Amino acid sequence: MAADLEAEVQAIDRSLMECSAEEIAVKWLQANDLQKEVYQHLAYYVPKIYCRGPNPAPQREDMLAQHILLGPMEWYLCGEDPAFGFPKLEQANKPSHLCGRVFKVGEPTYSCRDCAVDPTCVLCMECFLGSIHREHRYRMTTSGGGGFCDCGDTEAWKEGPYCQKHELNTSETAEEEDPLVHLPEDMVARAYNIFAITFKYAVDILTWEKENELPGLEMSEKSDTYYCMLFNDEVHTYEQVIYTLQKAVNCTQKEAIGFATTVDRDGRRSVRYGDFQYCDQAKSVIVRNTSRQTKPLKVQVMHSSLVAHQSFGLKLLTWLGSVIGYSDGLRRILCQVGLQEGPDGDNSSLVDNLMLYDSKLWKGARNVYHQLFMSSLLMDLKYKKLFAIRFARNYERLQSDFMKDDHDREFSIADLSIQIFTVPSLARMLITEENLMTTIIKTFMDHLRHRDIQGRFQFERYTALQAFKFRRVQSLILDLKYVLISKPTEWSDTLREKFLEGFDAFLELLKCMQGMDPITRQVGQHIEMEPEWEAAFTLQMKLTLVISMMQDWCALDEKVLIEAYKKCLTVLMQCHSGFTDGEQPIVLSMCGHSVETIRYCVSQEKVSIHLPVSRLLAGLHVLLSKTEVAYKFPELLPLSELSPPMLIEHPLRCLVLCAQVHAGMWRRNGFSLVNQIYYYHNVKCRREMFDKDIVMLQTGVSMMDPNHFLMIMLSRFELYQIFSTPDYGKRFSTENTNKDVVQQNNTLIEEMLYLIIMIVGERFSPGIGQVNATDEIKREIIHQLSIRPMAHSELVKALPEDENRETGMESVIEEVACFKKPGLTGRGLYELKPECAKNFNLYFYHFSRAEQSKAEEAQRKLRRQNREDTALPPPALPPFCPLFASLVNILQSDVMLCIMGTILQWAVEHNGYAWSESMLQRVLHLLGMALQEEKQHLENLSEENVVTFTFTQKISRPGEAPNNSPSILAMLETLQNAPHLEVHKDMIRWILKTFNAIKKLRESSSPSPVAETEGTIMEESSRDKDKAERKRKAEIARLRREKIMAQMSEMQRHFINENKELFQQTLEELDTSTSGVNENSIFEYSSPVISDAKLTALGPEQTRVSEQRQVVMCILCQEEQEVKVNSRAMVLAAFIQRSTVLSKNRNKITPDPEKYDPLFMHPDLSCGTHTGSCGHIMHAHCWQRYFDAVQAKEQRRQQRLRVHTSYDVENGEFLCPLCECLSNTVIPLLPPPRGLFNRLDFSGQPNLAQWVKTVSQQIKALYLLQDEDCASKSEEISGNSEKMDQLQLPEGFRPNFKPKNPYSESIKEMLTTFGTATYKVGLKVHPNEEDPRVPIMCWGSCAYTIQAIERILADEDKPLFGHLPCRQDDCLTSLTRFAAAHWTVSSLSAVQGHFSTLLASLVPNEKNGNLPCILDIDMFHLLVSLVLSFPAIHCQDFSGVSLGAGDLHLFHLVTMAHTIQILLTSSTEENGMDQENANTEEEVAVLTLYKFLCQCTGSALKEISSGWHLWRNLKAGIMPFLRCSALFFHYLNGVPAPSELQVNGTNQFEHLCSYLSLPNNLTCLFQENSEVMNTLIERWCSNKEVKRYLEGKRHAISYARESNKLIDLPDDYSCLINQASNFSCPKSGGDKSRAPTLCLVCGTMLCSQSYCCQTELEGEDVGACTAHTYTCGSGVGIFLRVRECQVLFLAGKTKGCFYPPPYLDDYGETDQGLRRGNPLHLCRERFKKIQKLWQQHSITEEIGHAQEANQTLVGIDWQHL
Ligand SMILES: [Zn+2]
Ligand SMILES: [Zn+2]
Ligand SMILES: [Zn+2]
Ligand SMILES: [Zn+2]
Ligand SMILES: [Zn+2]
Ligand SMILES: [Zn+2]
Ligand SMILES: [Zn+2]
């Protein structure tokens, strides 16, 4: 069946391809009714091309469509072969100066902060790089897709609108001309025809709603096939869809994922193909399955012809888009066609039709036509305007459709508003001609219908659906913002009229918000349900910028401002109508003043935080002052209508509410209220909330009697009784009143005083005080930095942003702060300049409580450091603007003096709790402010002015009868000596001093009285005494601190567990310090007694060193113990991991671990086993107990709650009990193992040849015995013993001897434990201590770890010895000793077998065939394995040959093999720099050796005649091996390193050779041993693999292997973004990847965190990154998530963490998540640090620490990344 179908399709295809496009076009050119002709053509062919089977075949379809459908259209359009026609058009075209590049998802975009008209104006990368903005302050973001480059749009840029590419020629002007003049007339006519027909066809078919019929097309032919079409929605999850599909259409999970992915991407996908019933059945299953909780998935059964035509319709739109790219003229024609009114009149153009159908179209179709609009209508300046009008007229409909639609806004036509409204000229035109402002606001209001009885918005009981709609409707506010963002430079009368109309609508909106979400204090019980509050705040937050912009607009035109002010006042009065109704007015009186007000208690009645109308009026009022309209046209303003008590009432209530919440009176109202208060003050909202409430109070006070204001205020704070009743305070001491109430009242008094401070002191907004905008921002920054030094981004966050996302900080920051660059960690910081500290105001109104106390502490500390007194007096303030000037009088008003006097009296009487220090502090601050005020008045005194501010006089006056209280001044003098007010003394002293200074100023003409100078002297002397006292105290404190420090370092020395943090620090220090002094090492070698003697690490001449006793301490039980053979085992916490850090081949397929033979390491080092340790020592039994406890705890925890930990107990993982370093096993500590088996040193040891012969005999004997063993088991044949007789047992060899294991049971156990762990991790198999591969893995890990460390030292250019941190030194010592001892716990015969096989790779024997050739063996691994397995044979040798001799011969043998390896693979290019003349002995010798090699290889080896080159190469190639060997033998035999190897110096090679018992001229080895070596070399070279290599048929590693580095990263981060945006998912055919992620190890880009690229790994689905780590990093990975600018560490499937990226902005900060968009540049030091972590194998450890520090990291599903 399938085959039939395929054949049929192919036959049709063939016949189709025979049609000629030209012929069809000719027919069309002659047709009378072109539309009919074209439609017939389409009706016939489209269904033949598209939708012929269940799956789309895009390539075939595209090819056929181009040939039969589009081809003719192109011929028709051009009137000739389009291959000639289009290039001609292109040439004739005058290219546009607009770039218009449409952004792909994730593409970098750039905006200039200096020149962009608003932040939505962006450039593509290419244009940006060619623009002047490169040198400006720019911002970089990644596009969310859609939107286009604004290069060339003169309205978008204040400067430099063109890049180099789009620049105008000098002759050109930007003036518009009709692009049609460049087209021939007949072409215009044809274009018009064909565009009209095809565009209409596409629109009709896409908007067609009937399933069985087509628009103007005949339904074609026989086949009634259908599709079951599944549509995208935003309600169902991926998983739901996949699950449903598997059920409904019976497909595999993979297919279902494929369907779901396409549906998500394109918006629809057919999931079944067949007859109607078949499809309908699937539909009903899908609907049934998805309708349970939510609305069902949208599915439709569609006729295949309809689907076919729709596919072609989309193709046509794309085609139109590309055709108009050839010519601006064609573009204009298409625009005309699109906007031409249809037969149905208004809103019937094709463009209208599409727009209005938008919400019903699927995603893919929307994308296609949006793109077309962008490349046509929006690129043509004339039609952009016309389109804007269409868009504005349809605005309401489009928005309503968008509300009903569930797709994100980026897929909606409504999103085009950003492209239109942000063009200033269009926005202005739409406001004046289409009344756009009003339309937007009204549409917005229409969609928020929930109101309470007063007509205010109500979000209280709104449903999820409403919440969803509410989120969508917020985008309208964004539109409003776009419209307002560029402010008019000129006002026409219409603009004024329409703006004010819009302002009216806006006021209506605010009116619905005024007083919304009212709350009442909960008494008795706690509220049951937290009321909804977020919606209202969201609205407020979103509107904040709009409100500010409205004010900015008003400020630009006096007439508008006056009108707006009036309108706002009217609306406010409407809101407040009846606000005094039903309440009996009450009369308050104090100090001879009285005022009438209403009875209202915040704590008992309703109160709301939302007062946008009041606040807007406050804002406008300030503008009256700022623009001076208030002084210029007072007669036009309704100032007389203002009722100050009404203005202040609601803002005051709101502030009282905050105070009461703070006093704990609203505790039962829950968190919602706390949150609201928080946001009310928050930087996001405060500008149009809290700040404006303060302004409104300032406005009120400046217009009324301050005494009246204060009494009303006291009354609202519910404190009137306290201050109006004399001796109120005294009652507390006598009566036993409720302490809570007293406490509450205290707090309220404090809050009220704070409010007064703010009202008087906050005058840094232009219009209130005589300041400018920079003063305001400077003050904000000063106060932020008074808390502590801050990073740039922290400061930005603390400052309000304007509509252009600017804080204005950069222009002033230099004046107030110094920048400190970051180090290797941390970020750059701004520090307050010292001279700015005098501007510090402790009661700065934007401080939170925590900030205030931190700032106070910091500032006092600073003063102490500068040896100043600690008073923090109020700073001098700028004068008020005239409109607010009278407000200062509040400070000297009678009621104020009464309040201050009362509180001071309480302090003097000091009667318990009816008084607080904060209260006093605030009163002192107010006194200070008043004095400052008076001082300034006096200083600025001009002739005609009389000083009306006479505070000093008033506070000198004592109270009147009947109180007869002392004057404020007198009380201050009393308080100065009060013992309980120590902290305030400096401040009181400051006040008195200032008071005297003012007095002096006033009496400046008269001679100063004597008494006063005396006073000052007295004051001075008492101050000195004070100072001395303070000094003494400071000294005591210092001594105490020192003592504590001493104690702490003592604890440190004793590894006290409780001080982990402290300890970790020390660890880090040790780690980073390169001194590497091994003082702390646990293995102390006795320093060489014979220091000038030659030190030799191995061989019979090995330097004898007496081992010192090693005593170590257990970190768990703190007991000390000596490391001895027969004592209890001590162990080091260790972590074993597989590693590819040294790999030279990351593509190697991992072999089956069960069958893999690890005996020989390949020189590509593709996967090794690394062992690391934190160096902490425990008793083996203490560790066992600890680990058991961890295990038990973990089991309990897992049963209780399914939480993960940062470590996997089941895999043997645990955290080091001291430093919490991730570990998975322990290494036993051992004494040097060689001494135990090394017998006396004989003279007359065998030479290499003899030794090889003896060992070969011994091996042979062992094999025979083995064979005999086997044989004797199976059958009794005496023949074997004959063989035994034949064999001469080498002298002194006793194959039956079984050596006694010298180690204690506990050590043996640990040898097995660590060995098994190495085996398990290294091979990824189940533990099996019997497996003969266990010892191999141990030797391998030892070799690999040494190689890794050698590389690090070499890369860092450090000397080989003496520079390792002691934890690594200890680890290597233990690891080497362990590996050397491990054979004692393995099967002797197995180890003997390993040895003989290993040796056979160099010295062939009959038994071991098929071994790797010498090119395929890593010689260092071979050396380590040979040396460490040799004792297994040697222990049976009683001939007197020393073990050391064997070591030496093995080492020489391997070294020679390596030499040959290097010479064979040497890739030297002779570069003509021949040094023939001065040939040294070494050069001659190596050349001879090389020639011998040539001989052996049958001259296949490349001819090299320069001994100099060869020798140089050999030396370089063998260095790493020698360095590793030196480390190995050093740790094995404990011979100290010669001092020459502990520094970087010349002749390292010679020193190494000497230490390793090698001749300096390595080739001497060959000469000395020529009898064996010549044969061996011949045999090595005759190996067939070597031959293949020499013939160039295979590859081999050459030496020295270069160290691996992480990939090179570009300096500019946007290069990476660009690279990532060009990357598409490798699995879903050219789709953009959502989370492109770069492997920093190999440079592969991956499609992370996405279904499409999940693969199965060990039976689990894993994401692309995790899968990649298994091939690239054997489970460990380092990635850069490009969109997030975040480094990702992964280890295994469950571990991961994020790490700061190595990219910094100019302020020394990273930008994780790319939220700020400052340009980022590579910080090489930080990148090196990451690289070092990798090279040191510390990635897993880093993850462990990160996860311990932040538990949320544990829960992340790392494997799906
Ligand atoms: Zn561009
Ligand atoms: Zn450009
Ligand atoms: Zn610029
Ligand atoms: Zn212990
Ligand atoms: Zn540790
Ligand atoms: Zn990789
Ligand atoms: Zn993918």
Image (cartoon, grey):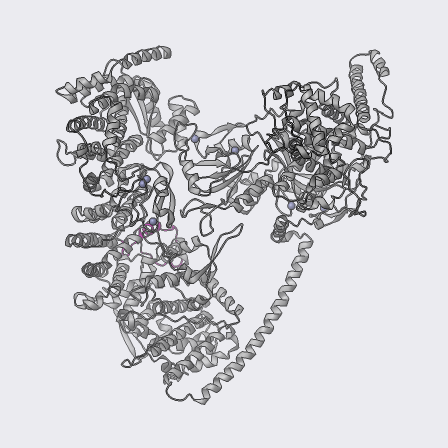
At which x and y percent is residue 190? Answer: 17, 26
| Quadrant of res 184 | top left
User: Quick check: 998 above or below 983?
Assistant: below
Indicate yes or no whether the magenta region holds residue 533. yes
The residues colored magenta run 513-540
Q: Nearer the viewer, residue 110 or 895?
A: 110
1640 horizontally vs 526: left or right: right
At which x and y percent is residue 1205? Answer: 56, 41
User: Quick check: 15 above or below 1689?
Assistant: above
The secondary structure that dominates the magenta segment is loop
| Quadrant of res 1229 | top right
1392 horizontally vs 960: left or right: right
1391 horizontally vs 399: left or right: right
The N terminus sits in image quarter: top left
Please state the total of marks drawn on the protein image: 0
At which x and y percent is residue 1066? Answer: 63, 52
